[in-house]
Amino acid sequence: MLLQGNVKILSAISELKEAISSCEFHGRDYYVQDNNYYPPVAGGAYEKATKERAKHLNNIGDFEQYIEQHIEHLINQ
C-alpha cells in the first residue's frame, strides 16, 4: 500500500507539472501592475511573478525527488 500511495503521488506531481507548463504565463498579464508599462520592466511585477513561479516549481521538483527516493527505497527492500 505504501508503494502504491507513493506512485500515486508521483503521478499527481507529473500531472501538476504538465498543467503548470500548459498554463500560459506571459508578461502582458502583469504590466497593469507596473503603471501600464509593456513590455515588462526589470524588477517589475512580471519578473517578480517569474521568480515566485520558479521558486514553487523548484519546490515541486524537490518534492518529486523526495517521492522518487521513497519509491526506490521501497522497491529495493
Image (cartoon, rainbow, N blue to C red):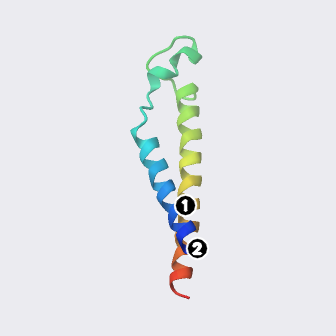
User: What residue did someone put label 1 on?
Assistant: 9
Q: Quadrant of the N terminus?
A: bottom right
Q: Secondary structure at mark 1?
A: helix
Mark sitting earlier along the chain (2/1): 2
Where is residue 46 drawn, in percent x and y? 53, 28
Q: Quadrant of the C terminus?
A: bottom right
Q: Nearer the viewer, mark 2 or mark 1?
A: 2
**Circles 2 and 1: CB distance less than 8 Å?**
no
* Residue found at the far left of this picture: 22
For image coordinates 57% across by 60% down, the residue present is 62
* Residue found at the far top of this picture: 36
The amino acid marked with disc number 2 is Met
Q: Count all numbered tags in the image, as a single digit.
A: 2
Q: Secondary structure at mark 2?
A: loop
Q: Which mark is residue 62?
A: none
Where is residue 37 drawn, in percent x and y? 50, 14
User: What residue did someone put label 2 on?
Assistant: 1
Where is residue 72 drawn, in percent x and y? 51, 78
The amino acid marked with disc number 1 is Ile
Where is residue 33 drawn, in percent x and y? 59, 17
For image coordinates 55% across by 74% down, the residue present is 3
Give the spatial CA distance, label 2 vs label 1: 12 Å
Which image quadrant for residue 32? top right
